[in-house]
Amino acid sequence: MSILAVAELKDGNLKKISKELTSAGQKLGGPVHIILFNGNDSHVSELHNSGADVVIKVNHKEFSPDSWANMITSIAKEMNAKVILMPHSLIGRDCAGKVAIQLNTNIIADVVEIKGNSDVLEIKKPIYSGKAFARLKVSSPVLITIRPNSQEVLENYQGKKEVKESKPEEGLVKVKFTNIQQVESGKVQLTDASIIVSGGRGIKGPENWPILQELADVLGAALGASRAAVDAGWIDHSHQVGQTGKTVSPNLYIACGISGAIQHLAGMGSSKIIVAINKDPDANIFKVATYGIVDDLFKVVPAITQEIKRLYS
Ligand SMILES: Cc1cc2nc3c(=O)[nH]c(=O)nc-3n(C[C@H](O)[C@H](O)[C@H](O)COP(=O)(O)OP(=O)(O)OC[C@H]3O[C@@H](n4cnc5c(N)ncnc54)[C@H](O)[C@@H]3O)c2cc1C
């Protein structure tokens, strides 16, 4: 009986959430097995170092939510997994419900904190679009999807470092992906970013994004946006943060000219440090901000960029 996690790759690289899952599994007492679809030796060693005792390699090039879910289910049954940890990502969410139904187990989605042990887990997750957090105590067996960037990553974990190959049954496949078109969404992926610089209606127009992009570049950050900026056609929807956009959990979220509507907070409220730059001292964003600057963003943002350049030049 152990903990089973599922790794995810993006453009040939292991997504950080995969290592967050193995680390979270060790927090629960392990041992941690992780399924790696189509991975290589370097992914295996990254997973071993971050808390995986056993990496189960599965060669299956074509992603399909049906076949991946069937394979995860079959491995979970075979090893009698108590806890299944999956990324709260597009792929994770696509498969998790199916796996939970097939295993007839409980599912808890979008978890940001996990404690306890693999028999009784203590869980924290946002509810009511991020207005509040629920704390739950749940007994295994259970399937949990974890919000990317919410967990610390173990380094230099010294476990069994075992590798297994598995060829689980693909099972009944109703949905097949014929083509995946990548949307151009900036240099750094929003959902994985540890720093996000985000702009709202306060940036006044698309011609002003370079001011925010310059700050994002010096920080190695991704560019986010409010729905008002997206709806105005100033930036692509792939940058939108919030209830109808992406859910992010970076170490640092810099909100520039964003009022802090509840639908925006739903997507970024679990950020570790929030810096708000807004000229309205009563803006709602200041209620969640760790640090607030009441001033004109067109003065403040370039000043921060210059200071960071000066410090690191
Ligand atoms: C069903 C539903 C789903 C939604 N989903 C989302 C979502 O996913 N994401 C999302 O963001 N919103 C979402 N919204 C919209 C949300 O309610 C807000 O309308 C939106 O977030 C407002 O965007 P904003 O903060 O950029 O604009 P505003 O609310 O207009 O705020 C602009 C801010 O900029 C400040 N400002 C102006 N000029 C400057 C300056 N020079 N310097 C500094 N500050 C300045 C102003 O003081 C103001 O606070 C949703 C709404 C609904 C009904």
Image (cartoon, rainbow, N blue to C red):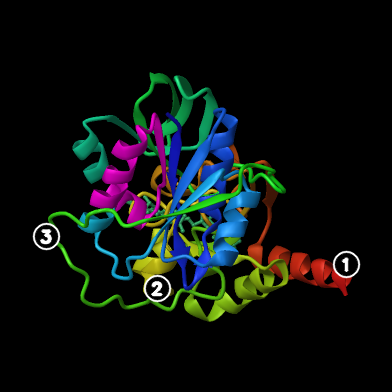
Q: Position of residue 4 (x, y in %)?
A: 43, 40
Q: Residue at x 60, y 48 (%)?
A: 161
C-beta proximity under 8 Å, tags 3 and 2: no
At mark 2, the secondary structure is loop
The residue wearing badge 1 is 311
Relative placement, left or right, of 173 versus 187 is left
Any part of residue 251 in sight:
no
> In which of the image's four quarters is ligand 1 placed?
bottom left
- Looking at the picture, does residue 138 appear above or below residue 293? above
At mark 3, the secondary structure is loop
Any part of residue 11 in sight:
yes
Residue in the foreground of this view, choosing between 134 and 282: 134
Q: The disc labelled 1 sits on which kind of residue?
A: Leu
Residue in the foreground of this view, choosing between 141 and 286: 141
C-beta proximity under 8 Å, tags 2 and 1: no
Q: How far apart are the alpha carbons under marks 3 and 2?
A: 31 Å
Relative placement, left or right, of 28 versus 142 is right
Q: Is residue 78 magenta?
A: yes
Q: The disc labelled 3 sits on which kind of residue?
A: Lys
Q: Residue at x 81, y 67 (%)?
A: 308
Q: How far apart are the alpha carbons under marks 3 and 1?
A: 55 Å
Quarter placement of the C terminus: bottom right
Q: Position of residue 182 (x, y in %)?
A: 37, 77
Disc 1: CA contacts within 10 A as few (<14), some (14-19) or many (>=20):
few
Residue in the foreground of this view, choosing between 22 and 188: 22
C-beta proximity under 8 Å, tags 3 and 1: no
> Could you say which quadrant of the image residue 129 lies in?
top left
- Main SS of residues in magenta: helix
Q: The disc labelled 2 sits on which kind of residue?
A: Asp
The magenta stretch is 69-96
Which mark, residue 236? 2
